[in-house]
Image (cartoon, helix red, strand yellow):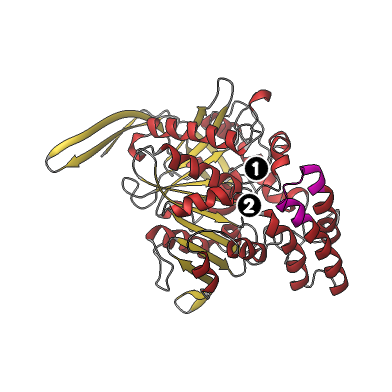
Amino acid sequence: MKIHNSFINQTRSFKQQKKKHIINYISKYLFKICIKRQMKGLIVALLVISLVACDQNPIFLNETYYSGYIDVTKKSNLFYILFESRSDPSTDPLVLWLNGGPGCSSLLGLFEENGPYKINNDSTLRSNPFSWNSNANLLYVDQPVGTGFSNASLGDLAKTEEAVRNDFYSFLTQFFDKYPQYAGRKFYISGESYAGQYIPAISSKILEENNPKINLQGIAIGNGWVDPQYQQPAYADYAFAKNLITEKKYKSVLSQFNTCASLIKNNAPFVLTSLSCNPPYLEIVGNPPKFNVYDVRIPCQGSGCYQAEDEKIEKFTQRPDVQQLLNLKGKKWVPCSNKVGEALNHLAQRSSTKQLIETISSKIKVLIYSGDEDFQCNYLGAEKWAYNLKWQGQSQFQQTEYSNWSIQGQSLGKVKTVDNFNFLIIYGAGHQVPMDQPESALIMINQFIQGSFNQKQSTY
């Protein structure tokens, strides 16, 4: 049960737009008392009452959201923003989204991919009908410390995945204490790219701690960087399959990538693997890039290949009213933090499969999905590491054929499932699947939460 007590200071401003005046009501404070009850028979087993600040504001199109900072060390914190489900926030699951990098802000996912909004050219918002909070409470976190709007003292920058997962587990325990209405709620972790390193590390930590407040049900990794031993040589395979290189060039770079993979397999120092792995990659991609490594169908535009979209986020978050609403204290947003990336760069060839196998073995649902137009973490590399993943269902997975994944006769991709392990390829999407195929991405996450990939229409 939720009771809203509103203490609202409203200011009115008028501006000319299409020769008409529009009144903007800006809500500064809205408080919500969240009461959670857990019943067993006729006995009240638990009653938790907490006062939690939330907002509903025209700037954010009156979606109910919570935002703030949670300290994970004395001098470092993680910034988060949570959006309530548009369906049934009191019972719908909690879904966490993490971007990769390392060091890239999850606001990229919020505003460019699967969040409630898209940003207009005039730094206002429009609603995203395919937002993942259609049927789930949706949480975005800038992590590790120092990423996006999160803060980090120099000594607190994470240099290992152990540090990443410990900081994030600290965040989660405090988050569920602060928002007890989500404690014990079905919880899913999702993300893309370098989150293929983050998510297995975090999920294994959650499983180790066995905290009843954190009811982890599944993880979803999109176009993830998981096992470079297999993903590095796939650059050559994918480039040749997409006619990005000639057969002669293919043979040359594949030979170099095979040496790279051998060094990774034998745990060679990072300096040696870099000297072996980077040159063939640059031979294919070029410097500056000859194509968009995140979507080979389109050109790379500016820094990060999506500079225009990234600049929209920067401009929106620099609006004084947005800064005030989110308590950003004048901090400037950047898509990816160089300091965070540099601190973790030596782990670029690390495999996260050990922790991923631990998660699969726990019977937690696992989804690996890939857009077929992505070069950077392409589906051929994902197929190779998934084929070689040494878990109890490996043999059956290797023998299982793909099934067509379609909705109402329209083919959206192909999928194969063995036990709790799902592997999905989505057609017509690049690295950022929810950006390129938003409807398919929403159907995907809904079906994953519901427990099966099928050909029935999913609710969205």
Going by the image, does 379 lie left or right of 202?
A: right
User: Residue lying farthest front?
Assistant: 266
Residue reaching furthest bottom? Answer: 409
Label 2 crowd (10 A; few <14 / some 14-19 / many >=20): many
Three-letter code for the amino acid on which mark 1 is drawn: Cys
Instruction: Please tell me which residue lies in front, 232 or 89.
Output: 232
- The residue to which callout 1 is attached is 104
In-front residue for pair 396/459: 396
Quadrant of the image containing the N terminus: top left
Residue 77 x/y as whole percent: 56, 28
Across and down, in percent, residue 161 comes to: 60, 39
Say which residue label 2 marks: 193
Give how far across and how far down residue 248 sits, in percent: 88, 72
Residue 161 colored in magenta in the image:
no
Residue range highlighted in magenta: 260-274
Q: Position of residue 100 (x, y in %)?
A: 63, 46
- Residue 174 lies, with reference to residue 315, above or below; the image says above
